Structures are given as C-alpha cells and as structure tokens.
Image: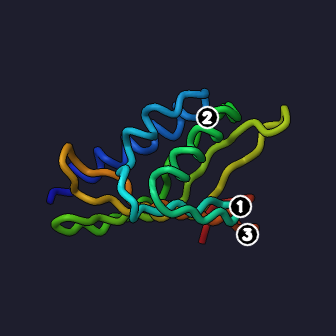
Amino acid sequence: MSRLEIEGAADRFYAALNVMFTGDAGPMKDAWSHAGDITYMGPSGLYLVGWPPIEKEWNEQAAARLGGRVTPQRLHMVVGTDLAVITCVEAGENVVDGRVETVRIRSSTVFRKEAGGWKVVGHQTDRLGFMTGGEAT
C-alpha cells in the first residue's frame, strides 16, 4: 500500500482526536476498527482490548471536553500490505481543571486495511517526564 494512504489515515486519526477534545467522539469512532482484537493503551497506564471498552473510553474522553490540540511530530511510518505502524511524538496542549497543560507524549499507532479503508487497531501512548520541556531526544 502507498505511504499516501497511511498519511491520510494518520491525518484522519489526529483530526478525529482533536475533534474529540471538543466533545464529539464520532470521528474517532469512525477512525477505529470495531473488531475484538484491537487495543488502546493510554498515557495513564490504561490497557483496553476490544471495541466495546475502547468505544466507552472515547465517549468518556469526549465528555471531558479537554479542548486544545495535539499534532504528530517526528512522524515515522512502516507500511506493509495490510498493516502499517506510525510512531511519533504527540505535542500540543489540553485544558485540565481550567489550566492549560502541555502535552508531549510518545505514541505508536497500528493501522489495518479493512473493508472501507485503513482503520486503527492499536494505539499506545507514554507520557514521559523528560519530554515535558524541549524536543524529545
């Protein structure tokens, strides 16, 4: 598959994430596979397997209306026939308890070619103390 298709899938995923910060989980739900083998590992240590608990998490995150925006930096792609992986640093800001907080998270996202296009089947993030300031090393 082409890198352009994966770039488009990654762009849709990050656009959906930013829309979710406004309270709308719909685009994020569209970006994900709804299969039983998918995983989400959040920056707080959360580890979810399968669509029902992941869908619930997106609804809860949307309800939090964190505001702000994150963008992928230092994006790297490995593209296969039916699977692709992107790694990056998610950087930006959210509003937590009325305070603007910097977001710098190491991220890996796995996409799988399914009917209808590339869908997220795994997303893992790690908030790292050394990444709270300048550029990640």
The crowd level at tag 1 (other Cα within 10 Å; few <14, some 14-19, many 20+) is few
Q: Nearer the viewer, mark 1 or mark 3?
A: 1
Q: Residue at x 20, y 69 (%)?
A: 80
Q: Which residue is mark 1?
A: 44
The number of numbered discs placed on residues in the rendered structure image is 3
Q: Residue at x 65, y 40 (%)?
A: 60
Q: Which residue is mark 2?
A: 62
The crowd level at tag 3 (other Cα within 10 Å; few <14, some 14-19, many 20+) is few
Q: Are marks 1 and 3 in contact (CB under 8 Å)?
A: no
Direction from residue 35 to residue 105 in the image, left or right: right
On residue 128, the disc is: none
Q: Is residue 106 above or below residue 26?
A: below
Q: Earlier in the sequence, mark 1 or mark 3?
A: 1
Q: Earlier in the sequence, mark 1 or mark 2?
A: 1
Q: CA distance from mark 2 to mark 3?
A: 28 Å
Callout 1: SS: loop
